[in-house]
Image (cartoon, rainbow, N blue to C red):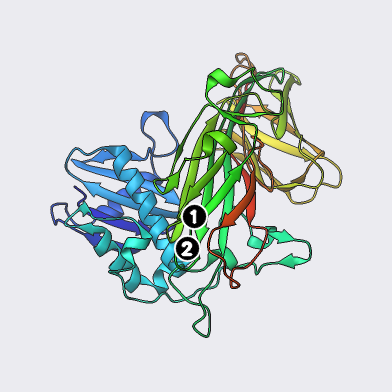
Amino acid sequence: MISQLFVLSQRGDNIVFRDYRGEVQKGTAEIFFRKVKFWKEDGQEEAPPVFNVNGVNYFHVKIVGLLFVATTRVNVSPSLVLELLQRIARVIKDYLGVLNEDSIRKNFVLVYELLDEVMDFGYVQTTTTEVLKSFVFNEPIVVDAAHLSPLGPAGLFMQGTKRMPGTAVTKSVVANEPGGRKREEIFVDIIEKISITFSSSGYILTSEIDGTIQMKSYLTGNPEIRLALNDDLSIGRDYRGSFGSGAVVLDDCNFHESVRLDNFDVDRTLSLVPPDGEFPVMNYRMTQEFKPPFRINALIEEAGAPKAEVILKVHAEFPSSITANTISVQMPLPKYTMRASFELEPGAVGQTTDFKQANRRLEWNLKKIVGGSEHTLRARLTFSQESHGNITKESGPVSMTFTIPMYNASKLQVKYLQIAKKSGTYNPYRWVRYVTLSNSYVARM
């Protein structure tokens, strides 16, 4: 099925390469990287996840800056191969603790051993961390977890004065603590990606949440656990209107194969025996109306024949106790835009602006935004011609990306987690992180 599998850095360096079938010519990694870096086909600025070059199908996913790529000459399901690449990345992260270029380079022997057990002559054998434990014998080399994923540090977990180490959730599930002690911890994340489209007047046209309850287990003996969700949780469109405005109504959901739903309809609890490593307990989708974390307003005013002014305002709708990180606002400008000068609000800190001449795009980056605050950018545009079309129609839409730790738009919650096996070695931290990411956040002009 799969001919080759390789991992590239952001610079195009070949970190890991495995040829399973020997039916694809050499140099595919370089061909792939050049094609992706200089992609200009179909009017797109970025290469699609699947494309064909000279009879070779390339499949790729980008995870924490690394490109996981598979090649084949046969016709296979794209969704199957893309899911396989995601799972391979997850298995490597389970074994190494931290997934980045440094950790893979220092553990390349272990990574190659994993790839040889996951795939045999291009056919998938298993992608389960627990099953692979019986066949993989190399020990991981611990690396510094200075550069973590966009979810932020594990220091978000706290209960009273207790605070777990910042790297607690970024360690290998197969490595013991110093002194041979076994870790006895379990972590739960609720990660939501939201997609919202606003009209030019600020009204919500479409909204959707794709969420995941993610779990990472370090418990020995694989004890049974119970996970309790909101009592007012409902699933299916038929439930809408039957509950109060505070109820959580999901359109649909699916569960990990280890989850048992014996009491789910009664008290909204999930029973499962968690496998080793990181896995999604539940995936869900929600299109019920919800309060957006940000409001975006864009205004374009003509200032003479060859000039115009763009005013962008971003207002944070979440509480002041919460802070959004790594915010990026982008806006395509008319193709005849020559220059753009920017004016930030007085006292602005941690904000940068740029005008991408190649694709006529305005970029506004903010390091953080505190809930309840509003930020404004003014951009003065100069055009290459005095006569032009409708500037408003040829501009936009405005798009936005961000990460908001300890915030979830759906209001889905984990009320409690119970472990059936009593043990004095389990660590009682407050273990739930809530994270909201932007999937598609667009304001039309």
Of residues 86 and 338, which is closer to you in this image?
86
Q: Is residue 439 visible?
A: no
Name which residue type carries label 1.
Val
In the picture of the structure, the residue carrying the numbered disc 1 is: 64
- Which percent across, then down, holds residue 256? 43, 45
Query: Sequence-wise, which precedes: disc 2 or disc 1?
Result: 1
The answer to the question of whether label 2 and label 1 lie on touching residues, with beta carbons closer than 8 A, is yes
- Which percent across, then down, holds residue 120? 19, 58
Which residue reaches farthest right?
346
Q: Quadrant of residue 139?
A: bottom left
Residue 188 marker: none
Q: Quadrant of residue 384?
A: top right
In this rendering, position of residue 82 left or right of residue 204: left
Q: Secondary structure at mark 2?
A: loop
Tell me the CA gap for discs 2 and 1. 7 Å
Badge 1, how many Cα within 10 Å: few under 14, some, many 20+? some
- Which percent across, then down, holds residue 425? 59, 73
Report the residue at 47% width, 48% height from top: 280
Name which residue type carries label 2.
Asn
- Which percent across, then down, holds residue 363? 63, 39
Q: Is residue 21 visible?
A: yes
In the picture of the structure, the residue carrying the numbered disc 2 is: 100
